[in-house]
Image (tube, helix red, strand yellow):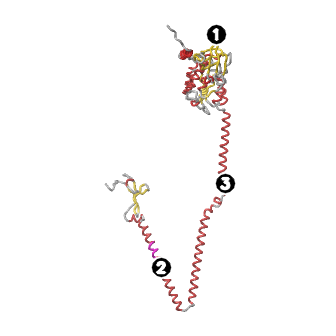
Amino acid sequence: MKKQQWSVKALVAYLKMKLDNDSLVQNISVIGELSNFNHHHTNHMYFTLKDDKSRISCVMFASSASKVNFVPENGMQVVINASVSIFEASGSLQLYVKEMIPFGTGNLALKFEQLKDQLKKEGIFNDEYKKSLPTYPMNIAVVSGKDSAALSDIMTTLKRRWPIANVSIFNTLVQGPSAHLDIIDNLRQADQENFDIIILARGGGSIEDLWPFNEELLAREIFKLNTPIISGVGHEVDFTIADFVSDLRAPTPTAAAEIATPDIKEVISTFNNIQIKLINNIENIINTNQMLVDTYKRGALFTHPDIIFKNFKLNLDLIKNDLNRWKDQKLRMIKQFAMISNSFKTKTSQTINNERLKLNNLNNNLVNNMTNYNNEIKNNFLKQIQLIDSFSPINTLKRGYSIVEKNDKILNSITSLVKDDKIKVVMHDGSINAIVIEKRFNDE
């Protein structure tokens, strides 16, 4: 059988295809020593991973290299997560690295990073889900280990900073394979009791000691809580998954208690300042209004009440003066007429007679006009009196009408009456008291 001839390119491509489709080598963890490490200016990382038996080339592209949270150095033992493939240009076998951590942290560290990346992609660490902490929490739940230093530090801090709060302790396991389940049960109970805030805490420790706080079940339970939660797990440099998913992370249990509560001394000082400001404002308002009252009291309106009538009196005086001037004017006119009359007397008798006749005519006309005017005024006045008299209730009663009252109220309809009602019937010359025996409408 004739053997198949391959080109180099075809052979390398075939081998690459076989490796790329082999699931056994597409997501593997490899432990080895860094050698020939080169952090390229493009931010890609090129290095060799070796042990005492063999070595293999590795490349870590910038997108993955940016997530490395330590400084790789030659001779360092590391654990990588990678896939196996062939670089076709050189035909060399190499690892394409996705993650890298120092070997000293072990598999738990790798598991931690993988879970953290998974939950981060799901978005449960996002700020949009973080609940705001209450300013003055009066009911605080502390979930921590019984008789632990962390619990002691928290209680000491709470008593010092915010002694007026009610603090409930939920003793829980904080270490061991089932500790995370006990923590979950305590968190659920605290959440159901509607506390203002929950503090989840323990002291620091190794990654193995802190592992219950890295469990996925606990992270998802914290995410579902309705109550704001502060994590105080570990020390300043230790982070757990619980820290990332909690609403706020404190570096220590003591810091968690300080973050969760205000300082009562500062609160008292603040409220004292507010009280002083309020008292000052109220006193200023009272003083201002008292000054206004005193000003009004000293005013002429209160010291001389008759000032209210002063303007009316002045107007009356003006009217009186106008009347006096009018009177004086009329008197002068009369004197003028008298002077004219006397001057006419010196004239001839005929002229005097003629003038006297004219004057008499004028006087008669004036008298007649005045008489007619007075009669007209009198007649109009009598008509008005008659009109008013025609509308008088007394005259109406004299014509046979009467007024019906119930409880001193005048009635205008029988709808206001029922049988046995006591009524008062008013006539023009007196009144009678009566009882309703029957009522009947006009259309019945």
**Mark sitting earlier along the chain (3/1):** 1
Residue 383's place in the image compared with 286, above or below, is below
Q: SS at mark 2?
A: helix
| Quadrant of the image containing the C terminus | bottom left
Q: Are marks 2 and 1 in contact (CB under 8 Å)?
A: no
> In this orientation, which residue lies closer to the viewer: 425 or 215?
215
**Mark sitting earlier along the chain (2/1):** 1
Q: Main secondary structure of the magenta part?
A: helix
Q: Which residue is identified by label 2? A: 369
**Residue 383 pos. (x, y %):** 43, 71
* Residue at 45 percent of width and 76 percent of height: 375
Label 1 neighbourhood size at 10 Å, few (<14), some (14-19), many (20+)? few
> In this orientation, which residue lies closer to the viewer: 24 or 122?
24
Q: Quadrant of residue 297?
A: bottom right
Label 2 neighbourhood size at 10 Å, few (<14), some (14-19), many (20+)? few
* Residue at 47 percent of width and 79 percent of height: 369
* Residue at 64 percent of width and 12 percent of height: 51
Callout in the foreground (2, 1): 1
Cα–Cα gap, marks 3 and 1: 105 Å
Residue 229 located left or right of residue 434: right
Residue 379 within the segment the image draws in magenta: yes
Q: Which residue is identified by label 3? A: 294
> In this orientation, which residue lies closer to the viewer: 12 or 39?
12
Residue 405's place in the image compared with 321, above or below, is above
In the drawing, what numbered circle is on residue 53? 1
